[in-house]
Image: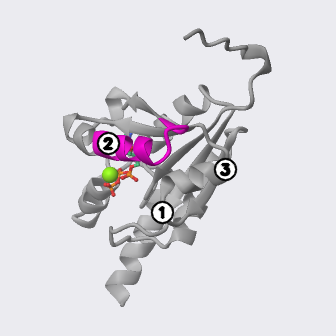
Amino acid sequence: MVNHYNAAAHDPVVAIYPGSFDPITNGHLDLISRGAKLVDRLIVAVLRNSSKAPLFTVAERLEMLRGATGGFCNVEVDSFDGLLVDYAARRNARAILRGIRAISDYEHELQMTLMNRRLRPETDTIFLIAGEAFSFVSSHLVKEVFALGGDISGLVPKAVEERLKEKQLLKEKG
Ligand SMILES: Nc1ncnc2c1ncn2[C@@H]1O[C@H](COP(=O)(O)OP(=O)(O)OP(=O)(O)O)[C@@H](O)[C@H]1O
Ligand SMILES: [Mg+2]
């Protein structure tokens, strides 16, 4: 089958980068900056109904994401409930963006991708390999190291580090 693709006349390519972003890390930011160059519009979307017990509320996560991505003109921050593919359909998104850090990410991502493809074949998933400097960075590890007094500078945006400190102080008081 010949696919007569006309790059000049295509509809804007919208992609969704879904996650819990609890909180955003510099690894996420690296993926966002690289992903934003590949598509016309990138929507970074916080999953509201996650099975993970979050440290930050959805509102706090959105605020940190907005602060960190304000410099990208084609990046939007949003949140969603329910199935990712339904949200993708509502937002006219053709692609889902995900990151792969190691083989351990691959298995889980493969399952989700195949399920999403089954549910909505029109939306395909794009994978970017993590930047070398961030391939060991995850939100949960950052939180764990921070809670134990380790240095997390350079792993999250400065504003996120401040928010983690505030959370810690509230916890110590409370
Ligand atoms: N450092 C990173 N580099 C590249 N991709 C990443 C990085 N961290 C997360 N991702 C990708 O971003 C997406 C959203 O991930 P998620 O919100 O689960 O972040 P996380 O850091 O893995 O958080 P958690 O530790 O809570 O699972 C996933 O596709 C994940 O593989
Ligand atoms: Mg994760």
Beta carbon of the mark 2 residue lies under 8 A of ligand 1: yes
Is 35 colored magenta in this rendering?
no
Front residue (pair 133, 1): 1
For disc 2, the marked residue is 109
> Looking at the image, is mark 2 or mark 1 nearer the viewer?
2
* Element carrying mark 2: helix
Q: Residues within 10 Å of mark 1 (few under 14, many from 20)?
A: few
Where is residue 155? Give x, y as percent: 38, 45
Residue type of the residue flagged with mark 2: Glu
Total count of labels: 3
- Classify residue 68 as left or right of residue 10: left
Q: CA distance from mark 2 to mark 1?
A: 31 Å
Q: Residue at x 73, y 38 (%)?
A: 73
Where is residue 11? Give x, y as percent: 75, 30
For disc 3, the marked residue is 91
Nearer-N-terminus badge (2/1): 2
Where 46 falls versus 100 (above or below)? Answer: below
In the current view of this chain or complex, which residue is farthest to the right? 9
For disc 1, the marked residue is 162
Q: Residues within 10 Å of mark 3 (few under 14, many from 20)?
A: few
Nearer-N-terminus badge (3/2): 3
- Classify residue 50 as left or right of residue 59: left
Nearer-N-terminus badge (1/3): 3
Residue type of the residue flagged with mark 1: Glu
Where is residue 53? Give x, y as percent: 33, 72
In the current view of this chain or complex, which residue is farthest to the top? 2
